[in-house]
Image: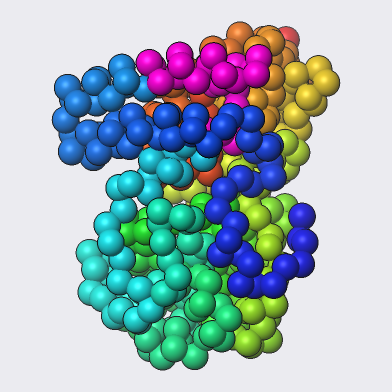
Amino acid sequence: MMKLLPLVSLVLLSGFGYAQGEPVLRSGDHKKLAKPLGKWMEAKAGQETEDQLKARDDLNKALESVQKSARGKEVLSLVGDWSEALRQARGTMVPRARTGKLQVRDTPAGKMALWVPKKYNPKKSAVPLLVLLPGPAEDPEAVVEALPSAVTGVFAVACPDLRDLDGDQMMEGAGRGRILGAGLGIPNQELLLDWNRIYLAGFGDSGAVAAQYGCLMPYYFAGVAIINGSTPEGLPSSNRELCGLTELAAAADLETWLGKETLRNPYPTEFKMEFTKAWAPRAYWIVAESFEAADSNGKPASLTVKVDRASNTINLTGEKVYKVNLFLNDAIVDLSKPINIVRNNKPYQYEAARSVGRILESFWAMGLDWGQVYPSAVYQLELPTPEDGE
C-alpha cells in the first residue's frame, strides 16, 4: 500500500483507489455518464425538482447506452468506473480557484488560511488536500508559508485558525465546526478534491487533536500525523491503526510522509472500530444508528467487521451497538448473489438490488465524496444482543 513515489508525481494521479479495481469502461463512457450526473448535481444544489428528474431520466438513458459496451459486466457493479464518472461530473461544478497565492479568509466556518497549488486544474485532475492544524497559539498564515515547497507545489492546504479556541472546545461545538468546516468543508465547496488523498496533521498540542479526529473519522483520511508532539493516551488501538497515525519530528518531515502515496481505502473488509463520541457514528461503509458512546466512563461501543468474499458473508460483532445501516457495493460483496449477514452470531440473508438512485443518494449524503460509490444499502439492521436468544 505504501509505495514510494516522488512527491510531485502525486499530482498526476487523479482517479482510482486500489480498492475500487481497475476501470472497465472506456473514457467516452465515463463522459457519457458524467454529463447527466453533473446536471443532476446542479439541479440538486439548486433544489430544482423538475431538473433533477430530467437529469435522472437522461442518466438512465446514458446507462442503457453504456451497458451495451460494458464487456458483459453489469455497469452498476463497476465501482471504479462510477467513481471516475462522479469525479468528472463534480469537476464541472467547482468554481474557478485562486491558485499559487496564500489566502487568509474569514469564512462561515471561521478564520483560516487556504493554499491552492499553481498547477491545480480540475479539468485534468483532482487535487490532494492537507488539513493542517496549527499549534493553539500559532498564526495559520505563517504555518502554511513555512511548509516545504515540495508540499505546496502539489497539495492544497487548509489551515483553520485555532487561536480563539481552548482545549475543551476542540472536539465539540465551535471547534468541530472550525476544524471540519474550514478544514474539509470549504475546500470541498471550492475545489475538486482527491478524496483518496486527504491527509490530516497537527502541530504540538493540536497534533493530539488531529489524532483524535483521525481516530473518530478514519474514513476521511489517507493518513494522520502529529508534528513535534505526542500521541495522546486513551485512543483506541484499532482506530489508530485505521487512520494510519504517525509522529513526525518537524514540518520538514511532511515531504517524506506525504510522498509515500498512502491512499485511503474506502472499503476495508476487515476492521474494528470503536465509537467514542455520539456525533461520530460512522465506520466506513457502516453507520451505527443506535449505540452507546463512551463519552464519560465505561467501555466504548465497538463494531468488528469481517467480510468473506468466498461465501458472500458479512460478519458483524457489535458491543453496545444495536442498529446499523450498511452501504454496499461490489468491492465489498457480490451484489448479484444473496448476502449472508451474521449479526452477533445470528444469521440473516439479504437480496440486494443495485440502483442509480442509491448511488446518487449516498453520494450527496456523504458530502460529494466521489471516492465512495454505493449502489445498494441495508437500513435499520438490528444487531441482536445475547439476551435476545435464538
Residue at 24% in and 21% down: 54
Q: Could you tell me which quadrant the N terminus lies in?
A: bottom right
Q: At which x and y percent is residue 68?
A: 54, 14
What are the residue bounds of the magenta stretch? 60-82
Q: Residue at x 45, y 84 (%)?
A: 144
Q: Residue furthest right?
A: 310
Main SS, magenta region, reads: helix
Q: Is residue 73 magenta?
A: yes
Image point (66%, 14%), residue name = 72
Kindly tell me whether residue 181 is visible in this rendering.
no
Q: Is residue 171 left or right of residue 97?
A: right
- Is residue 277 located in the magenta-colored stretch of the structure? no
Instruction: Kindly identify the residue that appears in the image at 38 percent across and 45 percent down.
Output: 90
Report the side of 65 relative to 5 (left or right). left
> Where is 139 relative to 371, above or below?
below
Q: Nearer the viewer, residue 176 or 45?
A: 45
Above or below, 115 against 171 in this view is below
Q: Does 151 sit above or below residue 210?
A: below
- Residue 360: give x, y in percent of width and height: 40, 29
Most foreground residue, 138 or 103: 103
Residue 340 placement: quadrant: top right
